[in-house]
Image: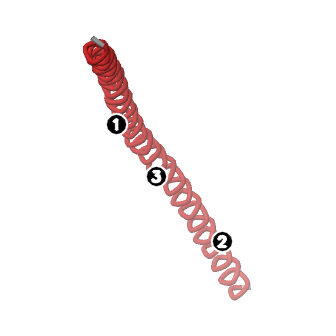
């Protein structure tokens, strides 16, 4: 009778342990699924961030190219204007020298 009681106690303890392990396993499964979902979410956010970064870099590159073209065009116009002034000054000086030579 005592032995039967001890066996029943041990069986109840084993059953309780099994239930606890099953509950822990279920909790761990939920935690794992939560972690996997978070990792997926973070990966998507990283990919979106990378896509946005690439797009922003492309926009800045285009903006830089446009500003560089404007600067280059302005520099070319300034040089052309300076060359025209030098040419005009040369013509004026030549005319003055020729005029002085004539007199």
User: Residue 13 in the image: x percent, y percent?
Assistant: 34, 18
Q: Residues within 10 Å of mark 1 (few under 14, many from 20)?
A: few
First along the sequence among labels 1 and 3: 1
Residue at image point 37% right, 29% down: 35
In this orientation, which residue lies closer to the viewer: 77 or 71? Answer: 71
CB-based contact (under 8 Å), mark 2 and mark 3 = no
Left or right, 80 with respect to 38, comes to: right
Q: How far apart are marks 2 and 3 (CA)?
A: 30 Å
Which marked residue is nearer to the observer: mark 1 or mark 2?
A: 1
Task: Tell me where residue 44 sits by quadrant.
Answer: top left
Instruction: Classify mark 3: helix, strand or loop.
Output: helix
CB-based contact (under 8 Å), mark 1 and mark 2 = no
Residue at image point 38% right, 43% down: 54
Q: Mark 2 points at which residue?
A: 89
80 shown above or below 30: below
Task: Tell me where residue 77 sits by quadrant.
Answer: bottom right
Question: Is the image coloured rainbow, by chain, by secondary structure, or in one colour?
Answer: secondary structure
Which marked residue is nearer to the observer: mark 2 or mark 3?
A: 3
Residue at image point 39% right, 37% down: 46
Instruction: Classify mark 2: helix, strand or loop.
Output: helix
Quadrant location of the N terminus?
A: top left
103 shown above or below 89: below
Q: Mark 1 points at which residue?
A: 47
First along the sequence among labels 2 and 3: 3
Tag on residue 16? none
User: Residue 72 in the image: x percent, y percent?
Assistant: 50, 57
41 shown above or below 7: below
Q: Mark 3 points at which residue?
A: 69
């Amino acid at each position: 009778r005592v032995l039967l009681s001890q066996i029943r106690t041990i069986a109840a303890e084993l059953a309780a342990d099994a239930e606890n392990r099953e509950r822990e396993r279920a909790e761990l499964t939920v935690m794992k699924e939560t972690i996997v979902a978070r990792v997926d979410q973070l990966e998507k956010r990283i990919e979106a961030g990378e896509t946005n970064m690439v797009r922003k870099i492309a926009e800045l590159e285009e903006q830089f190219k446009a500003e560089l073209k404007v600067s280059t065009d302005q520099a070319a116009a300034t040089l052309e204007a300076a060359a025209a002034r030098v040419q005009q000054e040369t013509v004026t000086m030549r005319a003055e020298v020729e005029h002085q030579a004539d007199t």
